[in-house]
Amino acid sequence: MPSGVKQRALLGALVVSFGKEVPSGRLVEELWGDRPPARTANALQAHVTRLRRLLPASSGTGARHDWLMTGPAGYALRPDHSTTDAQHFHRLGSRG
């Protein structure tokens, strides 16, 4: 679990939109509100990098970066690497 306020806010914003790309502008708003830092893109990228380091290695490739995808307009948590209870429930339910 991320220890910093910004890391938790970033993870929360990505989890809420699980599997969908969250625009960078929305993430900036979530992290800094109406007072973003001067170098917003660099600051956001630094937080994403730190969050990637905290994520467990994915079972498929063993790479941490596979969980958090960088898209053309923002970032997303990839659902194919999910191990949440909700995802497990949906997978089992679809089999039944």
Image (cartoon, rainbow, N blue to C red):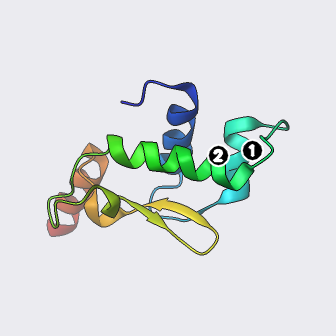
Count the numbered circles shown: 2
- Identify which amino acid the numbered label 2 is placed on: Ala
Q: Quadrant of the C terminus?
A: bottom left
As helix, strand or loop, the secondary structure at mark 2 comes to: helix
N-terminal of the two: label 1 or label 2?
Answer: 1
User: Which residue: 34% across, 45% down?
Assistant: 53
Q: Quadrant of the N terminus?
A: top left
Q: Is residue 63 above or below residue 29?
A: below
User: Which residue: 21% across, 52% down?
Assistant: 57
Q: Quadrant of residue 30?
A: top right
Determine which residue is flagged by label 1.
29
- Identify which amino acid the numbered label 1 is placed on: Glu
Q: Is residue 86 above or below residue 66?
A: above
Relative to residue 77, is residue 67 drawn left or right?
left
Q: Is residue 80 above or below residue 55?
A: below
Q: Quadrant of residue 62?
A: bottom left
| Residue 81: percent from left, percent from top | 27, 61
Viewer-proximal residue among 38 and 60: 38
| Residue 8: percent from left, percent from top | 50, 32
User: Which residue: 81% across, 44% down?
Assistant: 38
Which label is found at residue 43?
2
Viewer-proximal residue among 23 and 90: 23
| Few, some or many residues within 10 Å of mark 1 (<14, 14–19, 20+) | few
| Few, some or many residues within 10 Å of mark 2 (<14, 14–19, 20+) | some
Which label is found at residue 61?
none
Q: Marks 1/2: CA distance? A: 12 Å
Q: Is residue 34 above or below residue 14?
A: above
As helix, strand or loop, the secondary structure at mark 1 comes to: helix
